Image (spheres, rainbow, N blue to C red):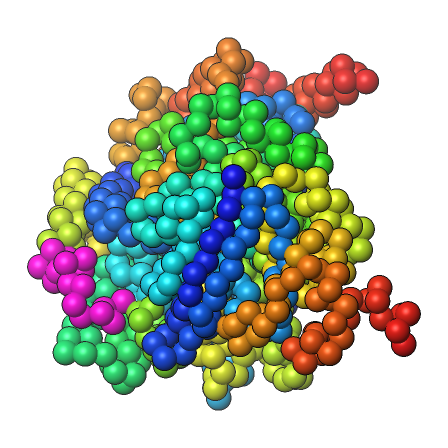
């Protein structure tokens, strides 16, 4: 389902996933003001931003553009690289573009865009793509400054079930390991099957199946390791506590106010009319 | 304390295919025992029986005069630490500190006691600086040290180690040997690294085909070339140069 | 099939979040009731396994292209519906955070489209096939049928959710005709991979498979209960969407018109109207700037000027802020 017809070599895909995880972890570990903000505040802020963003009218391109303020400011003030982030956009953008591309075809109502007459569908396509990009940027700001452990802590404050949080942390713990294991197994395969782009159907079952059985064995060992150290049925994965600071509340309140303002007043037009 | 008493232990994963056959042995408190033998001799299986990971054996297994059975497991596991061969199975939390604190926390210790024990275990293994590190980012040697710390934080009286020196570079291996020598506890170390056994253990048990073939002072058993070579082993490296 | 945030309107996202949360609550309760402590690590590691396996390229015989695994049906065959569902939620959340695959807002939709059908409907199909004992043939059949059916449902949901969000002018039937056949192909490949893996597991360690132990029936999801859950979810989705549609009847009429074959595109009846009204309900203050399709965006050049000025001010401010921070730490 994920890019079904891609012909990229399996190795490059897996190793790039591993490097991406490590890169993000490095960002999360930085000692930055953005990283120190309470995780719940950042989570709430991101969600509110995305809700405001996608609720803009499809023709309201200036409104959507004005929402670019949030990523612009945080990318600069938070010292994040926009080029690193834009590579992530390529995953979601194709579907968004594909769907958006039909708008100019079906919606031919004439419309003025910055002084030019264009099809209304063209405008709605642009806003759709902008929304897609901005949503990815804002999520990136969240994950580049907040570790998964801290996000899980924020989710536990929201009373998400403990099982789910435990699963997220366990999967996150073992994703790197299984990615490397998968990389090794596919590398070993391709070394003995030169010229093949993927895994031949005759070994579909055994290649992935072997990996699965090995993972099951590992799961058994992990369970043993847990029970040897007193795990019986329920354990709280998270014990950490992130202290609230007054600046967290100010940060949240400020951004919410900004989003509401941008959502309801055409900032760019207002500023522009001051000068023209 | 930390005494182990095994009488006529027989164990099989599948009926009819005994992995351990009629094993009897006793280990005194604070004794260090090396467990050697070919692949599939039953070393790991024996260690797992001691902490109740392999139940359904026949014969008797007692730790400090308490039989290993379902209802005594909690108490036995609290005083018996088992270090897995694969550190990635041992360490399942996201950071080192959290993982080391897992055991004490689960045994219901107070948070201040948990913290004290975590710090002590980290200091003992010399990895205090790794406390907040993600496990994914540790090297093999650091993972092994962290694995040992997760067990030390439970202050075990018995320490069971499955191939602790495997995949380690010489310096990390030496480091582990020094740490294990410092720890005061009953130790059983299953390994193919006979030189390490010589450095740590005063007594060695040789297993083959699920049975104990020899049991005696390390100096005696690990010098017996005929015995070792008859059981898919070799003399420890340090003894080879002189004799060849 | 991962939907991006841009493709969903807040109302649709909220509805789907509610449905997913309902199914998740049920699953959490079910997994807890099972009281099998081993399930926790097994679910976690299987999740990581699916995450990693999704990146393997499986060559499709005779085409030269390759397919991928999504894993819903595979997890169901191993963990049963509830465990598989919770695992899939976690996988989707991590993917959305780490790789921007999907989105935070669209997570509810993605969970429903990929995890809910794959796990609950998938389990239903699995159980129907496994009645009266497990065989390799049944495993293969269940995997393929399950994957195809659940992916078709998922694709259909994507169409409905996208249209209900009012972000596309694409007619309902055209969208549907594009999505369903593609996902028929994807589903078949997914089914074949799942079948290959599960039949391998069957020959090596059959006890790992869901329903392999016919005696442990008390832990299983009954057909009736599954239907009840699906019914409740359908009612929730239907209710949510119709609430949405009834206040803006144009949207629904528009879709119906598409289906009945009216070719003329009526700008007045655009689903955008619906979206526009949703905005008014979602925004806390009355909408000052825009009414209808007379967008304020294009009326003058001032938008561009304003944008440039705001951007300049921000960049200037941020540069000053960074300078200040650096000076502070130095």
Q: Is residue B237 left or right of residue C269?
A: right
Q: Is residue A70 left or right of residue B223?
A: left
- Residue occupying the point 41% across, 56% down: B61
Q: On the image, which quarter does residue C114 sit in? A: bottom left
- Residue occupying the point 12% across, 62% down: C223
Given residues A17 and B16, the one toward you in this image is B16
Given residues C231 and C237, the one toward you in this image is C231
- Percent x, y for residue B79? 48, 41
- Percent x, y for residue B84? 55, 55
Q: On the image, which quarter does residue B166 sit in? A: bottom right
C225 falls in the magenta region: yes
Say if B160 sits above or below A264 in the image.
Answer: below
Q: Visible in this render: residue A230?
A: yes
Q: Visible in this render: residue A96?
A: no
Q: Which residues are magenta?
A: C210-226
- Percent x, y for residue B183? 65, 40
Q: Quadrant of the C terminus of chain A?
A: top right
Say if C238 sits above or below A143 in the image.
Answer: below
A242 falls in the magenta region: no
Given residues C161 and C141, the one toward you in this image is C141
């Amino acid at each position: 389902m994920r890019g079904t017809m891609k012909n990229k070599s399996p190795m490059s895909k897996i190793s790039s996933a591993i490097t991406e995880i490590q890169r993000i972890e490095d960002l999360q570990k930085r000692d930055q003001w953005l990283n120190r903000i309470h995780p719940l505040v950042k989570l709430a802020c991101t969600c509110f931003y995305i809700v405001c963003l996608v609720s803009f009218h499809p023709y309201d391109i200036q409104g959507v553009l004005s929402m670019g303020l949030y990523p612009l400011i945080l990318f600069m003030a938070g010292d994040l690289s926009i080029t690193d982030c834009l590579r992530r956009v390529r995953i979601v953008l194709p579907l968004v573009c594909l769907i958006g591309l039909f708008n100019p075809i079906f919606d031919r109502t004439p419309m003025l865009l910055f002084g030019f007459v264009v099809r209304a569908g063209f405008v709605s396509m642009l806003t759709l793509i902008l929304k897609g990009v901005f949503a990815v940027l804002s999520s990136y700001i969240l994950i580049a400054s907040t570790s998964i452990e801290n996000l899980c802590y924020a989710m536990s404050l929201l009373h998400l079930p403990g099982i789910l949080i435990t699963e997220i942390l366990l999967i996150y713990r073992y994703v790197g390991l299984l990615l490397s294991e998968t990389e090794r197994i596919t590398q070993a395969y391709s070394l003995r099957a030169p010229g093949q782009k993927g895994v031949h159907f005759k070994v579909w079952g055994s290649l992935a199946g072997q990996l699965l059985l090995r993972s099951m064995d590992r799961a058994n060992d992990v369970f043993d390791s847990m029970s040897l150290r007193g795990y019986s049925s329920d354990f709280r994965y998270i014990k950490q506590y992130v202290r609230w600071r007054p600046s967290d509340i100010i940060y949240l309140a400020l951004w919410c106010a900004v989003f509401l303002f941008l959502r309801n007043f055409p900032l760019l037009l207002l500023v522009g009319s001051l000068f023209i | 304390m930390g005494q182990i008493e095994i009488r006529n232990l027989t164990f099989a994963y599948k009926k009819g295919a005994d992995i351990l056959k009629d094993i009897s042995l006793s280990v005194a408190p604070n004794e260090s025992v090396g467990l050697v033998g070919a692949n599939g001799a039953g070393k790991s299986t024996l260690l797992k029986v001691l902490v109740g990971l392999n139940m359904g054996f026949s014969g008797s297994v007692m730790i400090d005069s308490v039989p290993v059975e379902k209802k005594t497991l909690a108490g036995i596991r609290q005083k018996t630490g088992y270090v897995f061969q694969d550190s990635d199975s041992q360490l399942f939390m996201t950071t080192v500190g959290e993982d080391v604190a897992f055991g004490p926390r689960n045994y219901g210790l107070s948070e201040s006691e948990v913290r004290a024990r975590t710090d002590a275990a980290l200091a003992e293994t010399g990895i205090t600086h790794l406390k907040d590190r993600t496990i994914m980012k540790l090297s093999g040697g650091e993972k092994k040290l962290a694995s040992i710390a997760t067990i030390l934080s439970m202050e075990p009286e018995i320490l069971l180690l499955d191939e602790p020196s495997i995949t380690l570079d010489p310096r990390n291996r030496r480091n582990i040997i020094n740490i294990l020598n410092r720890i005061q506890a009953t130790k059983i170390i299953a390994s193919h690294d006979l030189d390490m056994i010589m450095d740590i253990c005063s007594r060695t048990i040789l297993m083959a085909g699920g049975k104990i073939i020899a049991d005696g002072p390390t100096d005696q058993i690990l010098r017996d070339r005929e015995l070792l070579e008859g059981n898919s082993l070799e003399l420890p490296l340090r003894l080879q140069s002189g004799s060849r | 099939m991962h939907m991006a945030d841009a493709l969903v309107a807040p109302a649709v996202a909220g509805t789907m979040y509610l449905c997913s949360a309902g199914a998740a609550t049920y699953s959490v309760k079910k997994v807890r009731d099972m009281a099998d402590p081993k399930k926790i690590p097994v679910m976690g590691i299987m999740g990581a396994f699916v995450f990693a396996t999704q990146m393997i390229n499986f060559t499709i015989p005779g085409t030269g292209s390759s397919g991928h695994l999504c894993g819903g049906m595979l997890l169901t065959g191993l963990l049963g519906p509830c465990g598989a569902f919770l695992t899939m939620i976690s996988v989707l959340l991590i993917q959305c955070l780490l790789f921007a695959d999907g989105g935070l807002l669209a997570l509810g939709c993605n969970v429903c489209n990929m995890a809910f059908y794959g796990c609950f409907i998938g389990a239903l199909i699995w159980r129907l096939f496994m009645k009266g004992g497990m065989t390799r043939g049944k495993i293969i059949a269940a995997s393929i049928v399950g994957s195809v059916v659940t992916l078709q449902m998922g694709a259909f949901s994507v169409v409905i959710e996208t249209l209900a969000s009012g972000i596309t002018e694409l007619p309902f039937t055209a969208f549907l005709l594009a999505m369903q056949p593609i996902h028929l192909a994807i589903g078949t490949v997914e089914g074949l991979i799942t079948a290959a893996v599960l039949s391998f597991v069957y020959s090596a360690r059959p006890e790992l498979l869901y329903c392999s132990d016919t005696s442990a029936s008390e832990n299983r999801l009954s057909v009736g209960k599954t239907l009840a859950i699906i019914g409740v979810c359908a009612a929730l989705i239907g209710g949510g969407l119709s609430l949405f549609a009834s206040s803006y009847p144009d949207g629904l009429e528009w879709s119906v018109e598409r289906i009945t074959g009216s070719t003329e595109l009526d700008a007045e009846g655009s689903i955008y109207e619906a979206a526009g009204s949703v905005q008014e309900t979602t925004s806390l203050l009355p909408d000052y700037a825009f009414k209808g399709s007379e967008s304020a965006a294009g009326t003058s050049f001032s938008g561009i000027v304003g944008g440039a000025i705001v951007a300049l001010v921000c960049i200037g401010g941020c540069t000053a802020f960074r300078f200040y921070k650096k000076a502070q730490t130095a």
